[in-house]
Amino acid sequence: MKKYKSWKSRLFDAVVVLLLIILGLSCLVPLLHVLALSLSSKNAAISGKVYLWPEELTFTPYKMLITDNRYLRALAVSFERVFLGGSINLVMTVITAFVMSQEEKDFPARKYYMWILLFAMLFGANMVPWYFMIKATGLMNTIWALVIPGALPIYNAVLVMNFFRNLPKEIKESALLDGVNPVQMLVRIYLPLSLPALATVTVFSVVGHWNDFFNGMLLINSPQKVPLQTYIQSLTINTMETSNTSLTPEELAALSSLKTFNAAKIIVAALPIVIFYPFMQKFFVSGLTLGSVKE
């Protein structure tokens, strides 16, 4: 017999759903405001009439982006960083996870390496020795300074390792009987069966590299080599510093025009993740839970 919920339970569920909807919409408010600002004229920005809907619709700020060489260069640096960093992260994660997923009879030192990895994950190096180590290796002011120090995301490696360890042991035993070596086993068996988990950690790496701005501030000295988020962050600081000073009407108009232009830059910078993230989100649950329960 079907069990019906009481009116109190249904009311509680409705309230929870309503609160979640309100919370979700509130997260969109800043993005909608920036989008509206980027599509509004500078006169509307000066008068403060722009809230969640464009006023005096214009696409001029987006047309100006085509001629902004510094912005386009920062965008190219971020794409290069995502490609290099994501590829290196994935390769290092897979290799480490495969080795650490082996049984102790096949890899006697496994537990010692596991403790080292867990210690490194929980207790990272202080920023000062981390910075001087990168400087001593000659990576400063290069794209490699943004990808090499974080080449092995240990958390991602632990996730993939647990996924590998929960694959049926019969598959490995059958492959060994057929004379498959470890490299063939990884490439032909483990990787095809682990695509959801690999997609999940790839999303983590891509989003992390794309959104990071702090490393660009510390490790890149040339304005031509900064990634996009570092460039956006510098625009925000410059705008805040300028707004705190007394301005003439002409300077205020120029600042308002720059404000709409910077809003367009923020929207374009957010587009790749906004487009990429929803399509990959379906892998999250399957990637993190597949194989987590053994029969």
Image: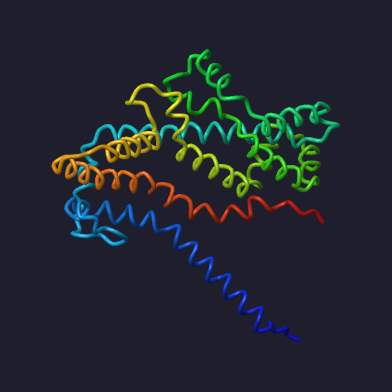
| Residue furthest to the front | 246
Looking at the picture, tell me which residue is in the foreground, 251 or 72. Answer: 251
Residue at image coords 45%, 19%: 140
Q: Residue furthest bottom?
A: 1
Q: Residue at x 18, y 59 (%)?
A: 56
Write the residue at 45% across / 25% down. Answer: 218
- Quadrant location, the N terminus: bottom right
Foreground residue, 160 or 244?
244
Which colour style is shown?
Answer: rainbow
Q: Is residue 78 left or right of residue 10?
A: left
Q: Position of residue 137 (x, y in %)?
A: 52, 14
273 relative position to 108: left or right: left
Q: At 72% from the left edge and 33% from the top edge, which residue is drawn?
A: 118
Residue 80 vs 66, above or below: the answer is above
Residue 4, image x and y in percent?
Answer: 70, 84
Up-down: is 184 above or below 54? above
> How many marks on residues?
0
- Residue 105 quadrant: top right
Q: Is residue 79 left or right of residue 55?
A: right
Q: Quadrant of the C terminus?
A: bottom right
Residue 241 image point, x, y percent: 31, 36
Residue 275 or 116: which is nearer the viewer? 116
Residue found farthest to the right: 105
Q: Position of residue 280 (x, y in %)?
A: 52, 52
Q: Is residue 53 above or below residue 233?
A: below
* Residue 74 sits in quarter: top left
